[in-house]
Amino acid sequence: MAGLKEIVALVEDDLAKVEELFEEQVRSDVGLLAEMGRYIQQGGGKRIRPALLLLGSRLCGYRGDRAILLASVVEFIHTATLLHDDIIDEATVRRGRRSVNSRWGNDITVLLGDFLYTKSMAMALSQDNLPILRLLSDVTLRMIEGEILEIERNGNLDATEADHLDIIRRKTADLFAACLRIGAILGAVGEERERAAASYGSNLGVCFQMVDDLLDFTAEEKTLGKPVANDLREGKVTLPMIFLLRKAGRPGIEKVGTVLADRGFGRVSREEIVRLAREHGALDEARALAETYAEAARRDLSAFERSPYREALEVLPDFILARDH
């Protein structure tokens, strides 16, 4: 199976320009900001969102440079969200090294996230495109709402599949959808194809987060680049646990409830929770649902003519389903 590097090879040069622009935009006369900016850029990441925007714009026939700046904008928004997430989750590791908040403290990290959000909007404003600016503003607000909903629902053993899907859409899928919709707006392909592009992004984003939920239970910490089973430890009842709670009856509910109450795997081990999830088919059910969204994303691409860009986007759901981190 093709890796991410092979899938995004069509826009490799543009992604390099996105990196250059990211580096340029995080520069600051304030030495600490500049140092932290370099730290987060050197931390790497998959850069899936900028790659999606670039591939989507090329899919829709756009060949200009505005996509490069806007791809940087969505990566700024995503990075700002990660910074704030790590503070909320009290995370100490991100991408295999110390998280920004554990290195510099929460106060400074909040301000760095605010700096990136503000930078992203300033960059978007320079494009003088009101529909794109409105879209980016709306999706940023929905991401914040999703974070608040997740906090509000923390530790809720009665959480439903619909509850969690709502959070997934707000926190993850809406930004994926925005990446594709921006590409369609740049390509001026019309409302029908714009909707199809956004639907692809949304379905892919849901699939991406569902796989993330699974990896939290099945991946190795060294591969994942952060502590495993963190979601349940932090009180987040994700799809694998929602399916387990629905199937396992009182013993399963009591064990999951104990982990949530303890905020850790002391009285109940992570291995015991994973074993229960496997025995009751909860992991398989979550995996099957992720595959459903991957297939829906592929179908969305039928609205577009065959091209190398469409083929790359058709392969991307398979990469997401197969990833181990």
Image (cartoon, helix red, strand yellow):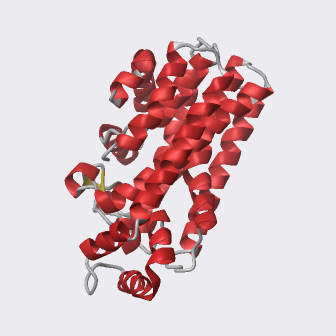
Q: Is residue 142 above or below residue 235?
A: above
Residue at image point 39% right, 87% down = 251
Q: Nearer the viewer, residue 301 or 57?
A: 301
In the rendered image, is residue 144 in sight? yes
Q: Nearer the viewer, residue 18 or 282?
A: 282
Q: Is residue 235 above or below residue 315?
A: below
- The spot of residue 122 in percent (x, y) is 62, 36
Point out the residue furthest to the left here.
Answer: 222
Residue at image point 58% right, 65% down = 161
Left/right of residue 271 with respect to residue 191 in the rendered view: left
Q: Quadrant of residue 194?
A: top right
Q: Quadrant of residue 170?
A: bottom right
Numbered circles on residues, count: 0
- The spot of residue 190 in percent (x, y) is 78, 22
- The spot of residue 65 in percent (x, y) is 56, 15
In the rendered image, is residue 122 in sight? no
Residue at image point 39% right, 57% down = 214
Q: Is residue 28 above or below residue 68?
A: below
Question: Which quarter of the image is occupied by the N terminus?
Answer: top left
Left/right of residue 96 with respect to residue 246 in the rendered view: left
Left/right of residue 258 with respect to residue 151 in the rendered view: left
Q: Nearer the viewer, residue 126 or 164?
A: 164
- The spot of residue 17 in percent (x, y) is 43, 20
Residue at image point 31% right, 69% down = 274
